[in-house]
Amino acid sequence: MYHDIDAQVVYNETFDNYTTGNLGTDPSGAVPGQGGWYTEMFQTVNNNYATITAEANKGKVLTLASAATAPYKCHLLVKRSDMATFIDQRSAGNNVLKFEIDYFTGAQHGKGSSSAHQEIGLYYDPTKLSNNDALIKILFQSTTGAITVQCKDQTKRVYLDNNPNNLPNHQVFFPFNTWVTFIVYLDYNNKKAYFETPYFNTVAVADFLTSSSSTNFIEDFKPSQLRFIFSSDVNTAQVFNKYDNIKITALKNVPPEVLSTNTFLSEKFNLFPNPATNIVNITNNEHMRVKEVEIYDTAGKLIGTQTFDQTQIQLNISALNSGTYLLHLKTSEGIAVKKLVKN
């Protein structure tokens, strides 16, 4: 197992030190409540629906709920806008941010796909907060249990279970009334986002900040606001989601075991010879075209990139030092990761 001695936990929230009851004091979102959290209620204007509650086996958690009486409708925002101060505590060079959160999916509810929108988001500009200002968003549809994830300037859909053939509408589903964990690595060094999902035992990879010409990504796109959105138009009962164990860790590199976990596409590719000295052949039986091959060392550092547009690749590795590397094979179906040993 990989252990980064330079890893720094810069933000850690378990809610266990909070007082049970209302999180906020001002439902207009102007005055902070417990822990520096702001609460903003749009339909039911009181703070009774963003609360700290006791949860079996977890201690205290944040609970966001709909109205307690009919018609039970609710739309609320809970946020912290001081995240940049925590990110600034990291050591120089720790430009990979690992974001973790436990999330309780709650009961199925809502009349339509857009009426039960729940969001976990990290934003880099607290003055704008449009969809384009989100570094990452995790979206849960309480009507269907579908989960989608987005990151800044991604170029394709991200499949948390690494299966682009999911139907309907290529969606990934989670069970209701279940605690799940989301882990995201934002790699500012290499412009990649890694979505680790223990529920599927997978890591999905996406492009990150691809449209920016910044020369200092982590300063220009530093997480500033963490926010949760809860909404429901259900008319029959009070419903809720819960949140716990929020953590942001600053790392120098994405851990090697994360880089090598993207197994869905990887199983479709063959490398030979392996170990190799000068040339390694990369083939697959499904005629997938490889657009680009990125070569990483086992510490997660990008060593080199070679561009192709072929189904069969001959990769020249003669300039590499002896050792173990991870090849990221970029295809139209996603990124496959294969381990290569150089003699």
Image (spheres, rainbow, N blue to C red):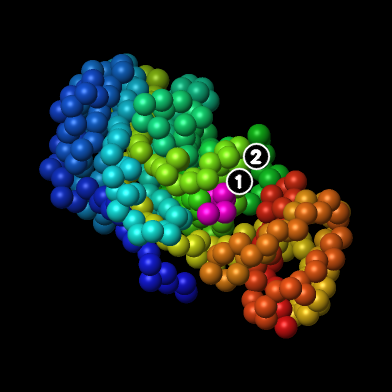
**Label disc, if present, on residue 155 of the rendered structure:** 2
Viewed as shown, does residue 63 lie left or right of 251? left
Crowding at mark 1 (Cα within 10 Å: few <14, some 14-19, many 20+): many
Between 304 and 233, which is closer to the camera in this rendering? 304
Q: Which mark is residue 122?
A: none
Q: Residues within 10 Å of mark 2 (few under 14, many from 20)?
A: few
Question: Which residue is at a point 33% across and 22% down the rendered structure image?
Answer: 74
Secondary structure of the residue carrying numbered label 1: strand
Decide which of 83, 285 is in the foreground and name it: 83
Callout 2: SS? loop
Q: Are marks 1 and 2 in contact (CB under 8 Å)?
A: yes
> Hey, what amino acid is under mark 1?
Asp
Using the image, determine if residue 313 lies above or below residue 215: below
Magenta highlight range = 189-193
Q: Is residue 67 magenta?
A: no
Relative vertical location of residue 30 with respect to residue 148 in this rendering, above or below? above
Q: Give the residue drawn at x 74%, y 80%.
A: 275
**Left or right: 142, with 211 as reference point:** left
- As drawn, is 9 to the left or to the right of 187? left
Question: Residue visible at 72% across and 53% down?
Answer: 330
Q: Which label's residue is closer to the chain start, 1 or 2?
A: 2
Q: Which quadrant would residue 65 be assigned to in this image?
A: top left
C-alpha span from label 1 to label 2: 6 Å
| Label 1 sits on residue | 207
